[in-house]
Amino acid sequence: MHRLVSPTRAHRVILRLRRCTGSFVAGACFALSLNISHAASTATMPETPAVASSALSNVPAARVLPAWQNGAARDALLAFVADVTREGSPDYVAPEARIAVFDNDGTLWSEAPLPFQIAFMIDQLKAHASEHPEWADNPAFKALLAHDRAAMAQHKKALLDLLSAANSGMTTDEYDASIQKWLANSRHPTLDRPYTELVYQPQLELLDYLRAHGFTIWIVSGGTSEFMRVWTERAYGIAPDHIVGTQEKLRYEVRDGRSVLVREPGFDFFDDGAGKPVGIFRAIGRRPILAFGNSDGDREMLEYTTSGPGKTLALLVHHDDGAREFAYDKDSEFARLDKALDEAATRGWIVVSMKRDWKTIYPAQKADGTR
Amino acid sequence: MHRLVSPTRAHRVILRLRRCTGSFVAGACFALSLNISHAASTATMPETPAVASSALSNVPAARVLPAWQNGAARDALLAFVADVTREGSPDYVAPEARIAVFDNDGTLWSEAPLPFQIAFMIDQLKAHASEHPEWADNPAFKALLAHDRAAMAQHKKALLDLLSAANSGMTTDEYDASIQKWLANSRHPTLDRPYTELVYQPQLELLDYLRAHGFTIWIVSGGTSEFMRVWTERAYGIAPDHIVGTQEKLRYEVRDGRSVLVREPGFDFFDDGAGKPVGIFRAIGRRPILAFGNSDGDREMLEYTTSGPGKTLALLVHHDDGAREFAYDKDSEFARLDKALDEAATRGWIVVSMKRDWKTIYPAQKADGTR
């Protein structure tokens, strides 16, 4: 059965940690927001027919983007792809310039009640606690273990330092292995599925559709490339070298005659807000023609994309479906959609309503509970 | 006529500028070396038969790597590619993991008498002089204009600041246009050919050969991605998104309603030495299996590559051909090959002698002087 849940907000802990990087990219700040939910109530929804994107290849006459409702958003996507791929069209774009950039958290997969990478980092902190007896007396650590909201809010900075420390010191190979292990053994607290199953079915179809029309897809996300790389190829068909993300500090070292990269506490580059166009320029070297995001952290990426010459398209996922997923926008602590929503209206960006535009949210589960 | 020259060292100005980035990557330093030659004497060499790589496709039975002499270096390349591509071989590597990384300056094209990007930056400085009347009194600028070696050596830091200032302030689009214009209108001071013709014919053949065997090629260079991107696709067939380089500071800005990236003085990341494995990890996300460099700045990249599991290959171009190109290694001020040369002997890295292993250095010129 396809169980979808609506989280209660009653027991949610909001913890917002903000860092600015004055010395790196002017004006680029990184908001590490923890929104820790202890929601336990679930609401079972009726089953929704879901179409796996892989099934399309055997059905030549199938309606494209089947999980997308008829409407302005789907129409805009189809029209845009037709315009830029039709030879002789004034809007024609050569295949090598058909660059599409997608935010990840909240755009390609869910991000509530807290971004999944933060959930992983908290679990790493707990897993490494036995190696750090000194943490026992750390008020931030005690607050986290006790789910003491007030105390956690009081010790934000100490908690961020702890998370950073617990997620450093190891080699990148060791860290990759711990991410893989965590993903294999963890389930979303309320949706009760492995995190990598909480990808959006309509977006999987869109990625396939764009690729079939000669587009190259990049993820441009506030999460770290390292966290995404271990699963994005399997989940989205996006290779490790097509991910632009926040960059952790790394130290080159030779251990027992073998070269390794060791994770250091802290970050060198925050791929969020005004950092996203910078990350795009550095990694891709071309201005995208399509950008898809879901929060104010994507605003500059959409502006940069739509400032290019020729036809462009910008879209925002609007999380307005509290019944099937989560509902949040202007007041969200972890992924605010406020200024970008206002800008969408004046700039002709397409706002995709999860409630109205998407027939299904997640891929169907198999009878045995797997996809 | 194919004219090759041997520069005299008599009038060379050595200017070495060094910056360390303590706050960025631990231990990563950037040596911006200026080695300004006023060599005027040229030596005409006999014409050398050159084979353009594009000619290979129509000659099915042609000897592969025709510009490479028979010998240990060519044998090692052919054996390595055969081993990792033969299905069933214990050394077989799947195509997606066939990552080859090449340094650029001195490995894919010449870098003497000074790295070509530095020549460009100096020309930018001169071109912008009229907008900066205050430079007239700057002793570093006066020394540069007067070719006053002693004064330039005395004002290294001021000269670096000037170069940085003269190469910032504009948008990335404007800067790209100035690079293209410079490349189209500049010639090497002694070899008297456009810079983009000073690519190595044996390496063009090797890139083609590796691609034909399923390898993906990346440039990993101490130069900036931005400087390389505008010409590497035409010169090497390497796309803008397959270049890992030093990263200039960038500022996101909206000008007249249009998003641009503005160049700021200074750099955020130095892709040299211990920075190269970091750059590789961040951009590619996989450990390469083949690495080709030519100086101590490539040492950690070669170590990192050969520390991977399975069969790997590391190579160094040895600039030992003062007659056809330039001769330098342990005493070079701009691209020292010292520690890496010693390490090659103990680690089994292949040292490619330009004199012994390469039949030709540059692609043949056409009768009208173009390629």
Image: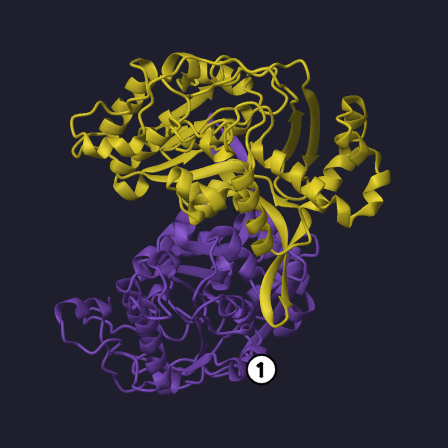
Chain colours: A yellow, B purple
Q: Who's the residue at 56% across and 64% down the image?
A: B145
Q: Is residue B289 left or right of residue A72?
A: right
Classify the position of the C terminus of chain B by image quarter.
bottom left
Quadrant in which the N terminus of chain B appears: bottom left
Identity of the amino acid at label 1?
A: Asp
Residue under the image location 30 percent in, 83 percent down = B359
Establish if A365 lies above or below B96: above
- Asked which secondary structure carries label 1, the reply is loop
Residue furthest to the front: A368
Q: Residue at x 56, y 80 (%)?
A: B343
Which residue bears the numbered disc 1? B331
| B23 or B345, nearer to the observer | B345
| In the displayed structure image, the side of residue A87 where residue B204 appears, left or right | right
Asked whether residue A260 appears in the rendered view, the answer is yes
Q: Say whether residue B171 is left or right of residue A149.
A: left
Q: Residue at x 69, y 43 (%)?
A: A127
**What is the chain letter for disc 1?**
B
